[in-house]
Image (cartoon, grey):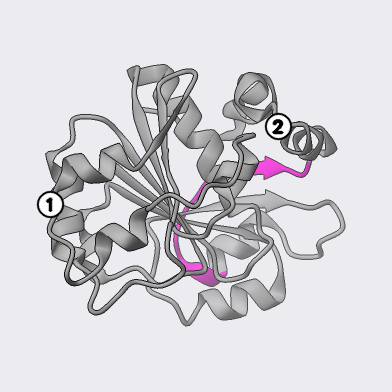
Amino acid sequence: MLTIFHSPKGGSGTTVTAASFALANAERHGKAMLIDMCGDSRAVLGLADTDSPGLNDWLGESHVAGADALVGAGTAIEGGLLVVHPGARFVAGAPRWDAFVSAIESWDFPVIIDAGTHFFPDELRATATDNWMVTSACYLALRRATRMPRPTGVVVVREQSRALTVRDVEAVLNVPVVATIPVDPAVSRAVDAGVLPARNGELLAAHLPSVR
């Protein structure tokens, strides 16, 4: 099962939302993988930065390693979550998207991708069980979102000061809102303190889409 989180605009809470959903999947299934295309997931989960190879190294055109090598590039944290960071800043040559899709399809545990505002190909989109856009009810974000491929659902990060509503988001994008997450300073404090994994259940999990 593959779930992709992405956003039309940076700063929308995509990484925290994807990390929280990945933690909930690991708790539910005993194991899950979070693949970070952006580079912030380790910090959100309280992990130190690393210079070790990651996703972009594995995707390189001349790379020949299979799915096991990508699993081996991950960092395991308590609760059964494996976190794969981007690694190199760029992918060398044409990315091996077909190999990436094959790897995901070979695993028997949930995979969550934090794509942020980064490109991800149609092959990956077609493989995903869910492809969720994370956004606030923000005019600029929705303006960009209308020009992007349609997601299967939207996660709205609700800010009280916004004039636009959840219904406005659904009407503009013509897709269902699958979750509404209130802005909570306690979540920011948990991320800053590196304790989101320990507090995910009480702070965020109840607001997320149901974990299958």
Residue 121 occupies quadrant:
bottom left
Q: How many marks?
A: 2
- The amino acid pointed to by label 2 is Gly
| The residue stretch that appears in magenta | 172-183
Q: Which residue in the structure is indicated by mark 2?
A: 194
Horizontal side of residue 59 vs 208, given as left or right: left
Residue drawn at (64%, 19%), measured in percent from left and top?
Answer: 198
Q: What secondary structure is marked by label 1?
A: helix
Question: What numbered label is drawn on residue 102?
Answer: 1
Query: How far from the left and from the top, in percent, is residue 123?
Result: 20, 65
Horizontal side of residue 73 vs 167, given as left or right: left
Q: Quadrant of the C terminus?
A: top left
Question: What numbered label is drawn on residue 149?
Answer: none
Q: Quadrant of the N terminus?
A: top left
Query: How far from the left and from the top, in percent, is residue 65?
Result: 15, 52
Query: How far from the left and from the top, in percent, is residue 54?
Result: 37, 53
Q: Is residue 174 magenta?
A: yes
Height in image: 88 above or below 1?
A: below
Q: Is residue 14 magenta?
A: no
* Mark 1 or mark 2, earlier in chain: 1
